[in-house]
Amino acid sequence: MIKNICVYCGSSKGRDPRFEAAASELGRDMAAAGVGLVYGGGNNGLMGVVARATLEGGGRVRGVIPEFLKQRESMLDGAQELVVVPDMHTRKRMMFEAADAFVALPGGVGTLEELVEQLTWAQLGRHGKPVLILDVAGFWRPLLSLFAHMRDFGFIHGDLEIRYLVAERATDVLPMLEAAHTRELARRHSDSAPIERL
């Protein structure tokens, strides 16, 4: 059902070894399931960990990296497909178009920006692709609390609700995404079904 997952994550590994372990496990699981990785193209940090684990498991990797980041993020040469683009906007568009779902591992401001952009587009009805937050060691809990705070103050409500999944273990990611993808397909089918007239 899901052929490719876009993974957003840090270009550093962070200070908790559980982050790296989760990235590696996710890459292995994707490779074993025949699900391709779409990511930012770098070899550093969690980006490199998830990409190398996918490759080592025999999986497919598509990296998309802007020209100005080729050196800073140490472009991963082993990917089956590595696309060098002129700017960040092109990178994000190409990653979006290639993916059937999105996963956010721990990361910095760039990871946060990419995650929130997908949540915003889904909120506005621009896509129905599942978005999953992998909350390794509680890393994303402050963000989840902020979402609740926004709801409490009336900035997220009704038709503006944001849809996302939260997993605490990498092993839960693929089953949760597949279930969400199936629900979305069923919803679309229901919405497009002809109305019976009496």
Image: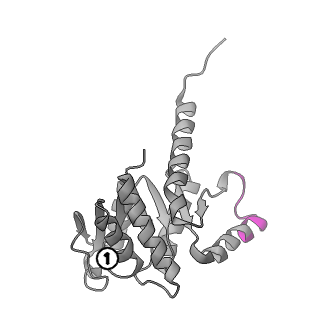
How many tags in the picture?
A: 1
* Residue 121 showing in the rendered view: no
Residue range corresponding to the magenta coloring: 149-158
Quadrant for the C terminus, please: top right
Q: What residue did someone put label 1 on?
A: 42
Q: Position of residue 129 (x, y in %)?
A: 49, 51
Q: Which of 184 and 22 is in front in this view?
A: 22
* Residue located 21% across and 74% down the image: 77
Q: In this view, does 184 lie to the left or right of 61?
A: right
Q: Is residue 16 left or right of residue 2?
A: right
Here the colouring is: one colour
Q: Nearer the viewer, residue 113 or 105?
A: 105
Q: Nearer the viewer, residue 80 or 128?
A: 80
Amino acid on which disc 1 is placed = Gly
Quadrant for the N terminus, please: top left
Q: Is residue 141 above or below residue 159?
A: below
Q: Position of residue 42 (x, y in %)?
A: 31, 76
Mark 1: few, some, or many residues within 10 Å (few <14, many ≥20)?
many
Res 61 → quadrant: bottom left
Q: Position of residue 102 (x, y in %)?
A: 47, 60
* Residue located 26% across and 78% down the image: 75
Instruction: Single out the residue that lies furthest toward the bottom.
Output: 15
* Residue 71 showing in the rendered view: yes
* Residue located 68% across and 73% down the image: 146
- Identify the element where label 1 is drawn: loop
Res 96 → quadrant: bottom left
